[in-house]
Amino acid sequence: MLNQTTRYVLSVLCYLANRGEERVPARRIAAEPGTPANYVAKILGTLSKRGVVLAEKGWGGGYALAATATEVPLGDLLVLFDADPGPVECPFPEPICGCRVAHDRAAGAAPPHGPSLGGAVVCPYGAMECANPVPCPLQAHWGKVREGFEKLSTTRVGDLAEVGIG
């Protein structure tokens, strides 16, 4: 449900979070979790410019998370790579529900955004409520998807190390 770039950013952050203060070469950050090297280079460059990752050149150099990065919510970092990093839009190429919001979005008009969470029925397109007589089959579940992403985006980078992956 997350786009490719978001998954790669999370992969790099998880990897570094589990290495602590160890300096890790970019090629190893790419190879061990299987993240493409070209993505890793761009991700590390962006995170380094923001002070989230420390870079050290030369023998014994590499990348490590900055001490202050542990308190940064993932959502603050994901927007550096994707303006809207949340769950992808409706998975149907042509919305099977005949959604007006989907039609408007395809025509270039942006729908109102601000779905409620907490188990409420939420439109995958971000409309406040669905006016379709036949709602999308995913509609009843989309609130849970967005709620899950909201929890992910408030997770701190430091919490990634507690999982024990890597």
Image (tube, rainbow, N blue to C red):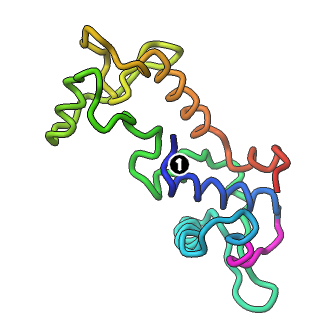
Quarter that holds the C terminus: bottom right
| 58 to the left or right of 126 | right
Residue at screen point 24% across, 31% down: 102
Mark 1 neighbour class, 10 Å CA radius: few under 14, some 14 to 19, many 20 or more: few
Which residue is at a point 22% across and 23% down the rendered structure image?
98
77 in magenta: no
> Please, what is the three-letter code of the amino acid marked with disc 1?
Asp
Image coords of residue 14 (percent x, y)? 71, 54
123 up-or-down from 152: above or below: above
Residue 51, picture quadrant: bottom right
Residue on which disc 1 sits:
76
Asked whether 159 or 91 is in front, the reply is 91
| Left or right: 80, with 94 as reference point | right
- Horizontally, is 147 left or right of 91 in the view? right
Quadrant in which residue 88 is drawn: top left
Magenta stretch, main secondary structure, is loop
**Of residues 34 and 148, the one drawn nearer to the viewer in this rendering:** 34
Q: Residue furthest top?
A: 133
Residue 141, horizontal then vertical, whole percent: 49, 19
In this picture, is 60 found above or below 84?
A: below
Residue drawn at point x = 50 percent, y = 29 percent: 146
- Residue shown at 46%/51% (left/top)? 79
Where are the magenta residues, as a range? 21-28
Farthest residue in the bottom direction?
A: 59
Q: Secondary structure at mark 1?
A: helix
Residue 92: percent from the left, percent from the top? 35, 34
Of residues 119 and 71, the one nearer the viewer is: 119
Direction from residue 98 to residue 13 in the image, left or right: right
